[in-house]
Image (cartoon, rainbow, N blue to C red):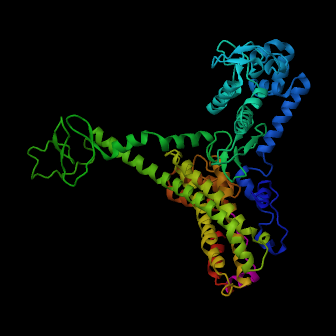
Amino acid sequence: MDAEDQDYYDDVFDSDDDDDADCDLDDGTDDYNALLNSTTDKSYLVLKEDDLLQRQQQDVTQVTTVLSIPKDSACMMLVRYNWDVNTLNEAWFQDEAKVRGTVGLLDVDPSVKFPKTGKGFVDCGICFDSIRKCDTASCGCDHSYCKTCWKFYVATAIDDGPGCLNLRCPEPSCDAAVGLDMINVFATVEEKKRYHLFMLRTYVEVNKKIKWCPGPGCEYAIEFDDDVDMGSYDVSCLCKYGFCWKCMEDAHRPLDCETVGKWVLKNNAEAENTNWILAYTKPCPKCKRSIEKNHGCMHMTCRAPCGFQFCWLCLGPYVGHDGRACNAYAKEGGHVPEAERQREMAKKAIERYTHYYERWAANEKSRKQALSDLHKIETVDLKKLSLNYRQPETQLQFIVDAWLQIVECRRVLKWTYAYGYYIPKEEEAKKMFFEYVQGEAESGLERLHRCAEKELQTYIINEDAANASEDQFTCFRAKLCDLTTVTRSYFENLVRALENGLSDVDSHGLYQGAAGGSSSNARGQKRSAQAGESSIRRSDVSRRMRTLMPTRRPLDDTQRHAAWMAGESSSNDQLGDQDR
């Protein structure tokens, strides 16, 4: 992670370049972070391995100082008490013997565990060889084993996983613990690293306020201050992976964890397979087994042992059916078989689900591709642009800002489709309002993504800068910054509307925003709704919904002239007219 990425995640992503003042991005990172974290005052902290080790060592030192015990013993007791220093101290002063018994910590001199003298021989309890006493070791109990067997015993326990942290004496009836002092003696260097890694992981996993980042290959942890009501649990790790600290799913603001859980379960549930069977198969009229039609002919034959032959269209016996069409349409109001009704309902349900799922998946795929493109831009393309147009990379940060905005907006847009799927069918006005605000945000994002992806390439590929002047690149800078700001505003409005539960639309389908007009106008709209004038109401709702959209700051004459010189005047004017 380079210094610029670190600055971004620490919310000090500021620029001193006065030439970019018109882009409104030099001090706009707070707005971007607000879309992700709901506030610029973060309620979480990203912890690296060194940070965790330092905190762990502080706890060990505190216990060692207060209880006057060795550090090895303090580590063993902290593991047993889930690294809760206060609970351990209280239990120790209430009953020291009980704590020692629970942990398996015997109050013996180290010379008892590792005898250095002694001419006598003892039998190893594992290999049953007769070993000199100075070549044996114990947990402080009466069970001595040769050092070779101890090495195998410790190595096997560490290879088995985190259970080695609670390793006991090899004697089944003995509860004496194998302490960290014995691990340091008998384990190899690699085994020690693995043992200490297990200890570090327990420090995080038992802490209610710290969790590991679930990003692929990430070794950072996140400490979340849930005592502060932030309204969102979405966090962003230094590895650029965003997730919900509460449910550990992908970051899903503005959706709540319950809705995300239902959507993820639906995507993985066997219920969708059942719906597919209902929609695209028919039951054999005789044995009722589901049959999928895999040939063009309507003559169906059920597999053995049933063997019943029937018509796929009418499900009637095929005997006497050959040469006779079953094309008569059932009159409206006539009897509709229950099985046919269920099939039609299943088809509609699958079509509706597919509509939202395809767009959910497409935006997730686009977000991942944007992350890949962003990495390439940061590592390769910025250097090319810096050489081509003789500008330091710090002045090209507006490109990174635009791509970070694209990544975040793709994530938000992805989850809005899950939100739309769960809007009740009877709330038509809310659905209209949602689709309008979502559509405006999506259109703005597509314009930004197209500019950052397609138009930027013309300046990256142009290595000699002969066909693109610095003035044209400056114009491109203004356009990309402007699109980034407008898109951010669109998505802030979208997120705000969804987090409020689309409450700006009342029970009569009317927008209740600040720009909603006079009370007499509202009463007139209410009477129209009650009278059933739905078309008038919908047009009024659409007109009022436009008040939620941001007003784009128009380009001044200098910028318009520069845009015209670059051949971009038309696209800028169209964007400005649409946003106004």
* Residue 410 makes an appearance in the image: yes
Which quadrant of the view contains residue 385? bottom right
Task: Say whether residue 557 is magenta.
Answer: yes
Work out whether 467 lies above or below 224.
below
Q: Position of residue 508 (x, y in %)?
A: 57, 48
For image coordinates 76% across by 83% down, the residue present is: 558
For image coordinates 63% across by 42% down, the residue present is: 256
For image coordinates 84% across by 73% down, the residue present is: 18
Q: Which quadrant holds the N terminus?
A: bottom right
Numbered range of the magenta stretch: 550-564
Work out whether 211 lies above or below 533.
above
Q: Is residue 359 left or right of residue 562?
A: left
Task: Say whether residue 116 is magenta.
Answer: no
Q: Position of residue 258 (x, y in %)?
A: 59, 39
Q: Which quadrant holds the C terminus?
A: bottom right
Work out whether 234 lies above or below 143.
below
